[in-house]
Image (spheres, coloured by chain):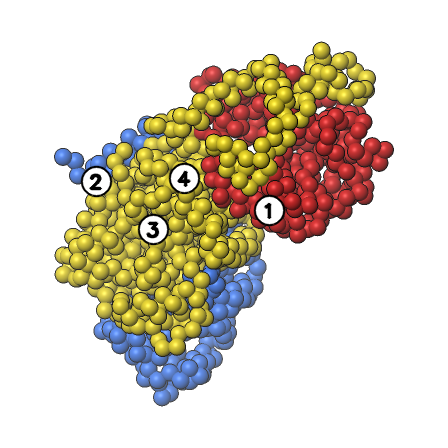
């Protein structure tokens, strides 16, 4: 598999990066506060709908239908968008997509674009690619602005600056806004309302003068050629409405077949992501509209590894994802490791199954992601499109274990363990060997087990295994009902 | 009804007392529980670490060892969930190496201990006596894969003398996760340290759960931190009675519940 | 050499080798085992729910009869001290009849975003309102105007007629024409980007006033 760009340079493996994050008390406090607040709200918003389970099942089924017939729906979408006055481009990978977007921007003669928050453009590293072509991309979502001004990386799908608290954000605004445009007002406080007001003023001049906008989309309706952007702040409406040219970069899996299908996702997405009955703004557009909004509309359909995931019958379900980030907010690992440790535009549980599928498992980081989970299952429980994330994680672990260099020592140990466990007599002998060594209870173990004894005691080995006890005592004396001796008898 | 004990390899090797408690409890309730000696391991460690093929002979072995029983009782939510949730999947993908029909026959007979007590035997008051303050940690696989719900709590509430206190953040993972604890030790330890802090905050003497692997992780941390809270498997609490509060009538070994 | 389009399509088809060749998209079952609407009360109850949900997300809600509307709008504009008010080309004639001393800028397609940035208020009708979610949908018809009209000004007054109120998202979608540019509005602009703490008012209108007309 060729290297697929997910908007990030080379990174340390997940355990290394996560370990550093666990020692950052401020980061852990920020993440804990934010994720715990939203997870409780989400639970309440979901509980309002008595038919949540039915909506969830339908959402999964609609996406499954779409994915199984993706070629059909892509062609249907292309035809509908074209008929409505849009132009459709196809991009095999990040470089392809970045080249297409840069050429489209250059054709307008502009050197500045405004951007709506989009996972796909983050994934392909569009801003950096445009910068290399002399084009400046202004992020207009508040959190993306915080990240851009702070020369930082996003750490959450919905709330990219979740790792920053209000006083850090104030400091970034005061320091950097002036370099990008209108400076932060004097005496800026760290009240969220004041920070939002500073962003409003800073960005307004960008919106009013922008000629080109770049967006992603939450959904594309195949039958009508309609694109949908779900947002809160109104920066999306600004970008989708004011410029003359709109370029939308969207993953090929974002299709839903029919207009009616939106009734499912427009109920599931806001409640799962921001815990609202409905997000403040949803924009839908179909090609171009006479006298209203952009005169030119370009849709760039992005593969960038998605067809690789599509080919895996277990992993395919990850393409159902609607980027709500509910799985991040309930994940105990994400809460402690932070988003950056996942080394990709897609952090958290969904990132742990999406990134290795899009990029492959050749780097140390990507091969470590499938293990970045205790398999507690909280992510699957909240997923509005029922992606069985633990199932896919285990499946990807299998790929890591069985392909490439894998983990040779672990493989040997697993084979040995299987050999012992396959046969009760061998197991009993192994247990007796352990029992003989029981007085030796080390406080610190060597090798991979060392990590265990860094913070925990090792369990004591009992004098006798259960199976030997049963064999010796017939289960500890008189049997209930006085029946005949059990199978375990001497 | 022919009832088999599925002890699980962790309990068999490291926590025989939990198995002894389960046997004593079930016999007290009139169940003539058997121990099929052919059993070994459900294959969870192999499967969850990415060695599905290595788990296949263990899945096949499980179906053979437990064939013909009406109920198979496991004092482990995690291993019961492995059998119920994953064994059919492994059989389905094994290209015939694991007979699907044998697996399909055995799987529905598997119960986690609290499920067996509440759903099959229809008891919540098992006649236990345990005069201590206890808090309960619902392990992830009991909670989310088996969906045992409040069954363990109903059992605990009916125990005489037991003072059940609520554990903050109870439904959050303790950070064990098998391979996870080894491969991501820092995050695993951070998760456990929160769990341990919540446990200590309850003022309970005993933290109880239905999974000894999670308890090994939590207990190992509690012991290292000298937190003053002990861990105990649900079965050992339910097996304790007024006449025999220390389990001397049913258990060997040194660890005593009271 | 294959172009990207053919390459992507070829990869998609290769990836779907497990899907039976004779399976049509509709052959794959989708059970719609969910409710068409959660709110099942009378039209009056549904209107009350709309009002509650709009208010819950910080829209200012007013209710009046058609006859009272011009008076109410005059009062709201006066309270907001609005001098310049933008309106779509086909706002019903009498709506601003009582708004004396207000300069009405009717958008004939020539109002620029910069000009709209300097108006005080915008008054529009809507296409549909969804009670369960507290949502107003604009479809850019002549009584609502171009999308930028209801976006750039900081104060948006939107009038909802009783027959435009539906209970659910599903019912709203059936009434809407996907070929038109649609804007679904649920309260004023908001963000939760700072510590996941909701703040109203970023780029869209910071004040949304919804006027629900009674039968």
Looking at the rendered image, the disc whose residue lies closer to the viewer, 1 or 2, is 1
For chain C, the rendered hue is: blue
Instruction: Identify the residue at the far bottom of this view.
Output: C101
Looking at the rendered image, the disc whose residue lies closer to the viewer, 4 or 2, is 4
Q: What SS does tag 4 mark?
A: helix
Q: CA distance from mark 4 to mark 2?
A: 31 Å
Figure quadrant of the N terminus of chain A: top left
Looking at the rendered image, the disc whose residue lies closer to the viewer, 1 or 3, is 1
Q: CA distance from mark 3 to mark 2?
A: 22 Å
Q: What SS does tag 3 mark?
A: helix
For chain B, the rendered hue is: red
In the image, what residue occupies the spot 58% across and 32% down? A442
Q: CA distance from mark 1 to mark 2?
A: 52 Å
- Rendered image quadrant of residue C4: top left
In the image, what residue occupies the spot 56% across and 29% down? B82
Marks 3,2: beta carbons within 8 A: no
Q: Nearer the viewer, residue A486 or A232?
A: A486
- Which residue is denoted by mark 3 in the rendering? A119
- Which residue is denoted by mark 4 in the rendering? A369
**Pointer 4 indicates a residue of which chain?**
A
- Which residue is denoted by mark 2 in the rendering? C5
Are dots 4 and 2 on a single chain? no
Looking at the rendered image, the disc whose residue lies closer to the viewer, 4 or 3, is 4
- What label does residue B195 carry, if any? 1
**Residue A278 point in image, percent of width and height:** 46, 58
Asked if residue B12 lies left or right of residue A239, the reply is right
Marks 1,3: beta carbons within 8 A: no
Asked if residue A33 lies left or right of residue B166, the reply is left
**Residue C124 point in image, percent of width and height:** 37, 72
């Amino acid at each position: 598999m060729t290297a697929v760009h997910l908007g990030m340079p080379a990174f340390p493996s997940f355990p290394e990066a996560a370990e550093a994050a666990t020692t950052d008390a401020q980061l852990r406090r920020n993440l804990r506060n934010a994720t715990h607040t939203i997870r409780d709200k989400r639970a309440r918003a979901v509980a309002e709908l008595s038919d949540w389970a039915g909506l969830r099942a339908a959402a999964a089924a609609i996406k499954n239908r779409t994915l199984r017939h993706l070629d059909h729906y892509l062609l249907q979408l292309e035809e509908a968008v074209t008929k409505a006055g849009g132009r459709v481009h196809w991009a095999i990978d990040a470089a392809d997509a970045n080249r297409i977007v840069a050429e489209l921007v250059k054709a307008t003669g502009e050197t500045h674009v405004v951007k709506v928050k989009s996972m796909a453009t983050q994934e392909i590293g569009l801003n950096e690619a445009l910068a290399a072509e002399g084009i400046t991309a202004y992020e207009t979502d508040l959190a993306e602005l915080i990240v851009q001004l702070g020369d930082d990386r996003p750490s959450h799908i919905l709330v990219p600056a979740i790792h920053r608290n209000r006083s850090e954000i104030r400091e970034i605004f005061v320091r950097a806004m002036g370099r990008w445009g209108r400076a932060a007002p004097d005496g800026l406080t760290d009240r969220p309302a004041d920070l939002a007001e500073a962003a409003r003023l800073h960005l307004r001049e960008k919106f009013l003068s922008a000629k080109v906008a770049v967006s992603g989309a939450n959904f594309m309706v195949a039958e009508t050629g309609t694109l949908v952007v779900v947002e809160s702040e109104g920066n999306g409406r600004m970008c989708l409405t004011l410029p003359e040219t709109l370029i939308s970069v969207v993953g090929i899996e974002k299709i839903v077949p029919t207009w009616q299908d939106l009734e499912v996702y427009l109920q599931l997405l806001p409640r799962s992501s921001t815990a609202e009955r409905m997000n403040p703004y949803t924009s839908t557009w179909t090609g171009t509209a006479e006298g209203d909004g952009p005169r030119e509309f370009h849709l760039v359909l992005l593969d960038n590894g998605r067809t690789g995931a599509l080919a895996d019958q277990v992993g395919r379900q990850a393409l159902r994802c609607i980027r709500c980030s509910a799985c991040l907010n309930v994940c105990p690992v994400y809460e402690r490791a932070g988003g950056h440790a996942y080394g990709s535009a897609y952090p958290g549980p969904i990132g742990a199954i999406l990134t290795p599928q899009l990029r492959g498992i050749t780097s140390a980081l990507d091969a470590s992601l499938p293990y970045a989970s205790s398999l507690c299952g909280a992510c699957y429980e909240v997923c509005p499109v029922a992606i069985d994330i633990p199932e896919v994680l285990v499946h990807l672990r299998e790929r890591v274990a069985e392909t490439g260099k894998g983990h040779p020592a672990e493989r040997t140990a697993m084979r040995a363990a299987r050999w012992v466990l396959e046969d009760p007599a061998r197991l009993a002998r192994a247990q007796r060997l352990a029992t003989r060594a029981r007085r030796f209870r080390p406080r610190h173990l060597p090798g991979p087990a060392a990590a265990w004894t860094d913070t925990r005691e090792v369990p004591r080995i009992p004098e006798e295994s259960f199976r030997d006890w049963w064999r010796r005592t017939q289960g500890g004396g008189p049997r209930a009902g006085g029946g005949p001796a059990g199978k375990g008898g001497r | 009804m022919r009832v088999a004990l599925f002890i699980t390899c962790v309990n068999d090797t490291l926590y025989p007392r939990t198995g002894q408690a389960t046997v004593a409890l079930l016999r007290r309730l009139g169940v003539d529980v058997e121990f099929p000696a052919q059993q070994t391991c459900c294959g969870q460690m192999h499967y969850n670490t990415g060695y599905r093929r290595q788990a296949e002979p263990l899945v096949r072995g499980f179906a053979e060892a437990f064939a013909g029983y009406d109920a198979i009782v496991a004092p482990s939510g995690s291993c019961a969930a492995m059998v119920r949730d994953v064994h059919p999947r492994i059989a389905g993908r094994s290209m015939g190496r694991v007979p699907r029909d044998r697996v399909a026959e055995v799987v529905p007979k598997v119960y986690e201990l609290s499920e067996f007590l509440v759903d099959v035997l229809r008891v919540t008051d098992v006649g236990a006596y345990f005069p201590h303050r206890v808090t309960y940690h619902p392990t992830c696989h009991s909670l989310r894969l088996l969906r045992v719900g409040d069954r363990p709590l109903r059992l605990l509430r009916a125990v005489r003398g037991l003072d059940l206190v609520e554990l903050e953040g109870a439904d959050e993972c303790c950070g064990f996760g098998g391979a996870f604890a080894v491969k991501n030790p820092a995050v695993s330890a951070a998760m456990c340290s929160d769990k341990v802090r919540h446990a200590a905050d309850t003022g309970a003497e005993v933290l109880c759960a239905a999974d000894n692997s999670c308890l090994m992780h939590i207990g190992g941390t509690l012991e290292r931190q000298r937190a003053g809270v002990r861990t105990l498997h649900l079965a050992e609490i339910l097996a304790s009675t007024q006449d025999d509060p220390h389990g001397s009538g049913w258990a060997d070994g040194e660890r005593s519940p009271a | 050499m294959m172009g990207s389009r053919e390459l992507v399509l070829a990869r998609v088809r290769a990836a779907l080798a497990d899907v039976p060749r004779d399976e049509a998209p509709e052959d794959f079952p989708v059970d719609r085992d969910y409710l068409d609407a959660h709110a099942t009360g009378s039209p009056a109850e549904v209107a009350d729910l709309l009002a509650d949900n709009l208010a819950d997300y910080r829209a200012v809600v007013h209710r009046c009869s058609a006859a009272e509307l011009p008076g109410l709008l005059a009062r709201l504009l006066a309270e907001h001290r609005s001098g310049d008010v933008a309106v779509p080309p086909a706002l019903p004639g009498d709506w601003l009849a009582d708004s004396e001393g207000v300069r009405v800028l009717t958008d004939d397609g020539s109002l620029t975003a910069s000009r709209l940035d300097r108006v005080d208020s915008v008054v529009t009708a809507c296409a549909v309102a969804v009670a369960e979610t507290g949502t107003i949908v604009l479809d850019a018809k002549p009584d609502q105007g171009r999308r930028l009209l209801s976006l750039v000004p900081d104060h948006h007054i939107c009038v909802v007629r009783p027959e435009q109120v539906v209970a659910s998202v599903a019912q709203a979608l059936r009434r809407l024409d996907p070929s038109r540019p649609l804007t679904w509005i649920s309260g004023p602009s908001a963000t939760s980007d700072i510590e996941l703490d909701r703040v109203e008012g970023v780029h869209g209108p910071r004040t949304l006033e919804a006027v629900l007309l009674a039968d």
